[in-house]
Every structure is written in structure tokens, then in C-alpha cells.
Amino acid sequence: MTFKGIHSVFFLGIGGIGMSALARWFQQEGYDVAGYDKTASPLTDALEEEGMQVILADEVAAVPAQFKVNPNEILVVWTPAIPKDSVLLHFFQQGFLLKKRAEVLGMITKDQYTIAVAGTHGKTSTSSLVAHLLKSAGKPVTAFLGGITQNYNSNLILSGKSKDSVVVVEADEFDRSFLHLHPNETVLTSADPDHLDIYGDEQTILEGFRQFLALVDKKGKIYIQSHALYRLEEPALAATGIREYGLRSDGIHAENIVAKPNSFVFDYIGSKNQIKGLELSIPGFHNVENALAAIAIALDHGVSEAQVREGIMSFLGVKRRFEIHSSQAGKIFIDDYAHHPEEIKACLSSVRAMYPSQRMTVIFQPHLFTRTRDFAAGFSESLSLADEVVLLPIYPARELPIPGVESEMLLDEIQANRKVCIQKSEVMDFLNASAPEVLVTLGAGDIDRLVPGIAAWTNSRPNPTQ
């Protein structure tokens, strides 16, 4: 895919996971790439090391000169996370070709065979696993992912050009972005309410998922998680290849699941294939369910059962998706991106199954004032699976504070032996005093900045079993 007449691409919000994958794709295609983000991060540092210019000031003067002349030769890609009063957004609205990330992704995938993975949660791990199973089996695949895969240390996978190449893309429901795509196959991993600041109510977001599934024509395939299918009330769809999956689904499902400290073992049961004793190196019941969809797709694309077994075992997961930093007895540390009540429930249920007799401490940073307000009861309920709960202040992201909405509002309904609200600066003091046996950090904000320090602290602690 080429963008006729375009020589340079500037990204507003280049440090975002999805945006940076696009930036890397354009650079690989030979375009001059630069971008702006609010703050530096390991991802922006990596992009600079790869040769892209990154500016951190919302000022026109900071933009490299070549990205301010000849507007008809410059594509500007922006994300709705950029504030509407941004100086740079206003500047690039004057005569430049300005498109949202989702529009550009739609343009790239329009003429290529595309597998699009959507869902309130599970889409990053599922799309990454689909891409890995295809690539590890030697299939030509390009993947735009919403997380940094541990196998490839990137959110972009490239396998060269081929007429048989498949594009795997994570399809984001935020701002209805996924409706810009042109999928030949879709996966819907979940359909729980979220982004109510965009959709307004639960029925509207469900209708958004129905519209996404309807993008597939009658020759296409749809893989849909059983509870999501139930929530959507079995919508009328053009595609004839609709395949239901789930841990306890009547369709594709798993049997004989065994939770181990560093992996889950299960049997894949499909309509045509049964693969016994698969070992998934990323733990979690939710990851087993994600693997069911990925395995079904891989088998449909000619991946052999032996290749599936090897691919499942060799998949190292995605950074910040049930990422185990320490598995030593008595000092276990797991970090996860979970920021929705159902995601937290899935994560903590799996941790409890892995370590049933050990004290679980959870540090959670709520993400967005609106999400905290809309799902307060759900957050309190899911966090109650822990023995100790530590709440950090809400990470605002694109939002302004809402009076009365703060982390403390979750405390009363959390049923845990100990629960407290602290500042990020107090985390290490808390850990020294608490000495958790199983520690889980959760959230989609900047809690990830604490993870390296916590990991170092965990691994340097004396082993309590000695």
C-alpha cells in the first residue's frame, strides 16, 4: 500500500502503542517519520533509537522544518487522545492531510487479507498470539498490535511481501475506530460495556460491536466468544462462517485445564480437531480462552497441529499482560494492564488458582475518572479477590477531574483484609512494611513506571522460605 504523493508522516501522539506501530510501518516503507508526545517513555526512546524524531513540546517551533513545508506531501496522523486545544493539532488542521490512526490503518488494510481482533478485553493477547502462530509456522504475516510482544520486542511484526500475506490487526472500539477497517475475518473476544464517555450507554456500545462484525461479508469468518455472542443476542450477520468459542462453550472449548506456576496446560477441542496437552507459557484462564480463538484461526490457515503445539509453547506473551517478573516462592510479582473490572477479575482469579494458599497483594491505579465512576461497584467487587488492596490516585489520561470521583470511593465496598489509598511515592515504603508473598500491579496509566523498581526490589529481597 502506498500513499500517493506523501513523502513524510508526522504523528500526534507517537508514543501510543497503536500509533508507534504505524510509525514503525511507515518508516519501514521508506517514509520520513517524526512525531509529538506529551512525555518521554521507553517507547518514545525506542522510536528515537530507530531513527525517528520525537518532540515533547506542544509548540510549532519544535516541529522539524521538513514537516512544516509542502503540506500536500505530509500526512499527519493523530489520535483522539490529543486534546482539542492542542497547539500542534490546530496548526496541522490548516492545509495538511490530517487523518485519525484508525483511518490510516483502514487504508493500509483495505486491499490486503485482514484478520481483525476486537473486544473490550483480550484483543491484544489474542491478536499477538494469532500473529505468532502464523509467523512461527512460516506463514507471511504483518501485524499491528496493541502491546509489545515478548517474542519480537515490538508492536509491529513484518514478514516481507507476498500475495498470500495476512494482516493481523488489533481493532480498537474506542471512538468507534474499528469501523474504519476492512476485515476478511474478525474475532470478538468480549463485549462488556466500556468507554461510556464515548458510547453513552451499554446498548450503544453493543451496537458498535454488531456494526464491527457486520463488516465481514458472507465469504468471511467470525470467531466470537460465547458470552459476547450471548450479550449481542446472536445478531443477524452476513458471514456464514460464524464459530463460537469459550472455556465452557458448546463450540470450540478447552478441557482438562491445569494451572501451573508459570504455565497453563489444556486440551483444545474443536469441531474438526482435538489437540491434547497443550502448554501455554503465559498463565491465566483468560489466556487459555484467547488461545482457543488463535488456534482455530491458525488451523484454518493451514498451520499443522504440531506447529500449533510448538507455537503455543514458544509464545512468550505481551509486556504488561500477565507479565511475571518473579516467580520465586514467597516473592512472586506479576504485572498486568487490566483496567476494567472484568479484566481484573480474570487476572486475579488466575493468580488465585496458581497460588491458592499465599497472601495476594494488589496495587491498582484506576484509569479515567469516567471509567472509575461508571464501574465503581465492579472495581470494588473484582478487587475483593485480593487479601490486600492498595489504590493509587486515578490516572486522568485525556480527562479533567470530576468532583467526587476519586480512588477513595472504591474503598468501602472492597472486601479485603487490608485496604488503603496511597500516593505513588509511597509504594516502596508500603512494600517494605508489607512484604507481600504474591504481588500484582494493575492499571493502564503510568503505573508501569513503577514496575522496574518493584521488580528489582522483589528480586533483591531475602527469600522468606529460607
Image (cartoon, rainbow, N blue to C red):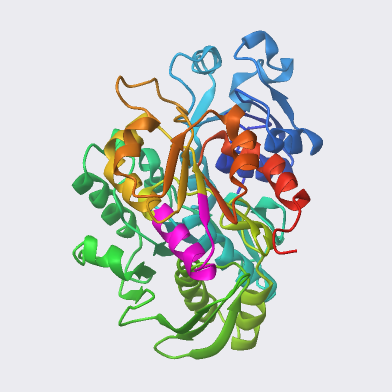
Residue at point 65% right, 15% down? Answer: 68
Measuring from the top left, give residue 318's x and y in whole percent: 61, 56
Q: Where residue 193 sits: x, y (%)?
A: 29, 48
Q: Which of 115 and 379 is in front in this view?
A: 379
Q: Is residue 359 magenta?
A: yes
Identify the image quadrant of the C terminus: bottom right
User: How would you classify the magenta stretch by its main secondary structure?
Assistant: helix
Q: Which residue is drawn at 58% across and 42% down?
A: 17
Write the start and end of the magenta stretch as one range.
343-361
Q: Does any portion of residue 111 appear in the rendered image? A: no
From the viewer's perspective, is residue 47 above or below residue 225?
above
Q: In this view, does 301 lie to the left or right of 67?
A: left
Residue 177's quadrant in the figure? top left
Q: Position of residue 267 (x, y in %)?
A: 50, 86
Comparing 441 with 336, the one in front is 441
Give the residue displayed 67% in from the left and 8% down from the top: 61
Label total for image: 0
Q: Is residue 93 visible?
A: yes
Observer-nearest of 461 and 397:
461
Quick check: 213 above or below 37?
A: below
Relative to 49, 445 lies left or right: left
Which of 244 and 405 lies nearest the eye of the viewer? 405
Q: Is residue 124 above or below residue 91?
A: below
Residue 167 among those drawn in magenta: no
Residue 228 rendering spot, x and y as whole percentages: 29, 63
